Amino acid sequence: MGSIYSAVKCPQCGRSAIEDFYYKSDESYIICYRCGFNYSKTISKSDRRRIEYKEEKQVGHGVFSLVKRNGQRNMTLFNSPIRKDDIEKFTKSFMENDVDQAVSYLVSYEKEIFTILLGKPPENFSLCFEDYKDKMIKKYGEDYEDIEIIVPIEE
Ligand SMILES: [Zn+2]
């Protein structure tokens, strides 16, 4: 089934999240690789007369992006606060020989504040959605007709 894959403003942190919108069924999924927020709206019941949807939401408390030297990426979204002993555990995996520390990062999100705990997130990470969108329009504007509506996704 057809879906539109686009960057949208994250309802939780205001930075750029990713939406997968199924325009025929009106189902949608939002996932934010900045703060860890995720949301889904899916059909729970349908018959000829009406469709019922169910919505599910998970608050975000941060993300851990671990990239191996072979390019393999492991993305963890935190739906509860990152604990101290978790940070120790993640620091250990971050320091492993096969990890590319230059592109891996651990960021927490608490009380609307992002804190970089390990590594260095990409430049787009820190942009609010409006600035991100402006950047995409400047970069790809001439190639995309619907760029105002369908904003390209970049890490
Ligand atoms: Zn977010």
Image (spheres, rainbow, N blue to C red):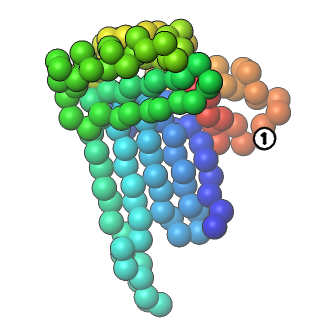
Q: Which residue shows up at 32% across the image and 27% down it? A: 62
Give the residue furthest to the bottom: 48
* Front residue of this view, candidates 67 and 98: 98
Residue 64 placement (x, y as % from top left): 39, 25
Label 1: state its secondary structure. loop
For the C terminus, give its image quadrant. Answer: top right
- Judge whether 119 appears above or below 47 on screen: above
**Seen in the image, is 121 located left or right of residue 4?**
left
The spot of residue 75 in percent (x, y) is 44, 32
Whether residue 15 is situated above or below residue 121 in the rendered picture:
below
From the image, tell me which residue sits under label 1. Answer: 145
Please tell me how crowded label 1 is: few (under 14), some (14-19), or many (20+) other residues with Cα within 10 Å.
few
Q: Callout 1, which amino acid?
A: Glu
Q: Residue at x 42, y 82 (%)?
A: 46
Question: Which residue in the rendered view is the most extreme toward the left?
Answer: 84
Q: Is residue 28 above or below residue 37?
A: below
| Horizontal arrangement in the rendering, residue 147 relative to residue 101 (left or right) | right
